[in-house]
Image: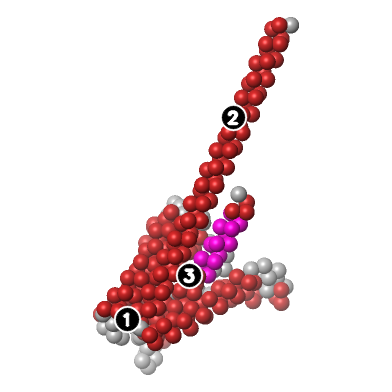
Amino acid sequence: MKRLRENQARMHLIMMLALTFTTGIIDAVGYLGLDRVFTANMTGNVVILGMAIAQADGLPILGPVIALVAFLVGAAAGGRLLRGSRKGWSGRSTIAFSITGTVLLGLGLTCFLVVPEEGTPWAYTITGLLGAAMGVQAAAARKIAVADVTTVVVTSTIVGLASESKLAGGDGKNFPRRVLAVVMILVGAGVGALLLQVHIGVGMGVSGGLTLLVALAGHLMREKVKAAEAEEAASVGADAGATAGSSAAAGSDATAGSGRG
């Protein structure tokens, strides 16, 4: 059982890194294909919005606002969905990631039918839906609680990478996963930029498909752990029952022997 739980923790790390990769894709699609807006990295939106309000030339205002508000709504909805569920992967985690994956995949397919043009209502609709979907993902990933891998931001990961490294006098315990998180979002952004040259819907579709695979993998692992826990509980119960039965039989024999004496 201990090994199974270790495998589950390892699987959670791999899945969150995969989602970090898809985040890079989605942010590249948003920034390059939807008029310089981030749909997962809200720090970027806040910075762009601040500069735009200060009347920096050519920077968008409406897109970042829509993405920011939609992300907040999505994160709130995800938090509400996961309220009361235990830390780690739960049935509600599967639902949350499935929602994100379905939205991303659906938008990707729809964009093949109606290509979004920058500054149009359809482009802003996509921005909002992407932001909401990534907000749900962020809330669900927070509940999974894989240290240093939030799936939507790497600034805090980079801080931990440097400040807790052996060079800084730390133990460097989570150094590999921190490096991988940064690399995955970097590679994801590069892949997203390349896919955008094919079609704006490709990156969304690929991200959606990968997210749905993560949801399925997490669900299957959870079911495997639940089955093992049930088997272990049944085994413990059977052993306890056998022990109680043996004790009762021994007591009965002792009483009978005393009576014959």
Dot placed on the residue nearer the N-terminal end, 2 or 1: 1
Q: Amino acid at mark 3?
A: Leu
Categorize mark 2 by other alpha carbons within 10 Å: few (<14), some (14-19), many (20+). few
Task: Provide residue 64's location: percent of width, then percent of height.
Answer: 37, 79
Seen as rendered, the residue at the extreme right is 261
Q: Main secondary structure of the magenta part?
A: helix
Name the amino acid type tagged 1. Leu
Viewed as shown, does residue 91 lie left or right of 108? right
Query: Residue placed at 38% from the left, 85% from the top?
Result: 198
Q: Which mark is residue 241?
A: 2
Q: Which residues are magenta?
A: 5-17
Q: Which comes sooner in the sequence, label 2 or label 3?
A: 3
Residue 164 percent across, percent down from the top left = 66, 72
Q: Residue furthest bottom?
A: 57
Q: Are marks 2 and 1 in contact (CB under 8 Å)?
A: no
Residue 210: x %, y % from top left: 44, 69
Tell whether label 3 touches label 2 (CB within 8 Å): no
Is residue 181 positioned above or below 1 on the image?
below
Q: CA distance from mark 2 to mark 1?
A: 67 Å
Give the labeled residue for mark 3. 19
Q: CA distance from mark 2 to mark 3?
A: 46 Å
Question: Residue at the spot x=46%, y=64% of the render?
Answer: 214
Describe the element under mark 2 as helix, strand or loop.
helix
- Judging from the image, what secondary structure is the residue with disc 3 in? helix
Taking depth in this image into account, of 108 and 89 the one nearest to the observer is 108
Q: Which mark is residue 104?
A: none
Q: Tag on residue 62?
A: 1
